[in-house]
Image (spheres, grey):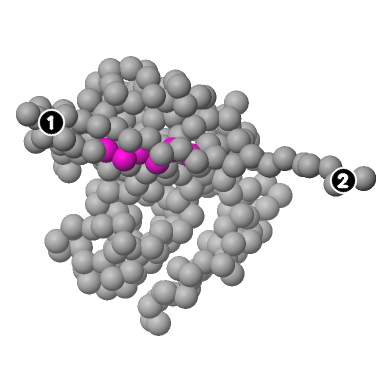
Amino acid sequence: MAEKKLIVVHVAYDPEAKVWWTESSDLFGLNACASSLDEFRTILPGMVQDLIELNEPSWAGHDIVIEILAHGRERIDVPAAA
Amino acid sequence: MTDYVKQLRDILREAGFEFFRHGKGSHDIWRNPKTGKSVAIPAKVPSRHFANKILKTEAMTPSLLAILLNASGAQAGQAMAVDRVLPRQEFLDRERIAAASLFKRKEAATHRRNDFRLAANHPALRSRRRQVGDRKRTAIGPDDVLHPRAVGLVHATLTHFKIADARLTRDEFTLCDLRFN
């Protein structure tokens, strides 16, 4: 059974640019950016594969698990009760 | 929408990175031949926060620090500050300094711990800073703010850096102003 390798990717939302972006990750060089988390998830595998091939060749053959931790902030105004 | 990718590529080139190949997706792979490390750069970088993150985590490799140190003429093992532009400065138009960025820098000066870390015998921020301040009425083009000079490669403070082993971690130095504003 292939050894498991966990890559944690922290994703933040930029309300100014309206994109989700990689704030930090366990994989050097990982810089993904997308307008939605769904799109982000589709971008990530190819990028991770590229970077493992180039930066972490020893991870080849591992069972790679990508954990995405996203955080954003929304503000709402709730009118005071009359 | 602003796209910072062109400026990022310029900075990565300055840091010794080269375009390596297109990635499996819309990103490109850039590689630093000296460190052997590769980074993924998306086709578009619309967020300045994201651009700043890339600068601080990827571009600031030992190779870029070496550029900065060479520019300063600093000695190994010394606490030092870099207040010089990167190589190729001759291509940079001093009259087109992005005042907006530098003004932000000036405003933030009181909050910068870097300034308090300068070695006792180190010259404090010098006349250039004042010159820049005096130019605050200089016309600025929209691209100037993102010029490599404007994004802060002109000034960084490094502390307790040992150039001999060149194995830097981000914790071993303090950067200021390397950012898109």
Numbered range of the magenta stretch: A7-12
Q: Is residue B132 above or below residue A72?
A: below
As shown in the figure, which amino acid type bears the numbered disc 1? His
Tell me, for residue A62, which label it has, or none: 1
Relative image position of residue B139 (x, y in whole percent): 68, 41
Question: Which SS class for mark 1?
Answer: loop
Could you say which quadrant of the image residue B121 lies in? bottom left
Residue placed furthest toward the right: A82
Relative image position of residue B141 (x, y in whole percent): 63, 35
Could you say which quadrant of the image residue B29 lies in? top left
| Label 2 sits on residue | A81
The residue under the point 53% across, 37% down is A13
Q: Is residue B116 above or below residue B146?
A: below
Q: Is residue B40 above or below residue B22?
A: below
Q: How crowded is mark 1: few (under 14 residues within 10 Å), some or many (20 or more)?
A: few
Question: Which SS class for mark 2?
Answer: loop
Circle 2 chain: A
Is residue A30 rendered magenta in the image? no
The residue under the point 53% across, 30% down is A19
Tell me, for residue B162, which label it has, or none: none
Q: Is residue B47 or residue A66 the one in the foreground?
A: A66
Residue A67 seen in this snapshot? yes
Gap in angstroms between the C-alphas marked 2 and 1: 56 Å
Residue B6 seen in this snapshot? no
Q: Number of callouts in the render?
A: 2
Are the residues flagged by discs 2 and 1 from a single subunit?
Answer: yes
Q: In this view, does A73 lie to the left or right of B58?
A: right
Relative image position of residue B133 (x, y in whole percent): 63, 59
Q: Is residue A7 above or below residue B71?
A: above
Circle 1 chain: A
Question: Which quarter of the rendering shows the C terminus of chain B?
Answer: top right
Q: In this view, does B111 lie to the left or right of B58?
A: right
